Amino acid sequence: MKRDIEIHKQVESELAKRSHFCQKLIKKLSGKIKLLEDEIEETNLEKKEKGKLKRKKDTSKNDKNKNDLITFLEKSLEQSEKKIAKL
């Protein structure tokens, strides 16, 4: 019984560490998503103010890269939340 209790304490400690790590990761990724969303909103406002409808190749590539990054971060966030929910 004492051995079982010790094993359970070790497992509990390990799960607590994982949970803490996942929570930090979620906060970090959420912050990155927020920054990217703010940046996109800022870019959209600038475009509206200037009245430019044309996009340059570089801008569209950057927008695509940002959108890809946002998608990746959102998926990572969802996966981390699922892992935490399992824990």
Image (cartoon, helix red, strand yellow):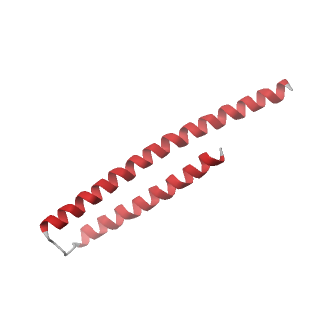
Identified at 37% across, 64% down, the residue is 67
Identified at 39% across, 53% down, the residue is 33
> Between residues 23 and 7, which one lies in front from this camera angle?
23
Give the farthest residue toward the top: 2
The part of the image, by quadrant, that contains residue 44 is bottom left
Percent across and percent down for residue 7 are 77, 31
Percent across and percent down for residue 48 are 18, 67
The part of the image, by quadrant, that contains residue 59 is bottom left
Q: Is residue 83 left or right of residue 69?
A: right
- Relative vertical location of residue 38 with respect to residue 14 in this rendering, above or below: below
Identified at 19% across, 75% down, the residue is 54
Quadrant including the C terminus: top right
Q: Is residue 87 left or right of residue 2?
A: left
Percent across and percent down for residue 24 are 49, 40
Q: Is residue 16 left or right of residue 67?
A: right
> Between residues 65 and 49, which one lies in front from this camera angle?
49
Identified at 34% across, 67% down, the residue is 64
Give the farthest residue toward the left: 50
- Relative vertical location of residue 28 with respect to residue 59 in this rendering, above or below: above
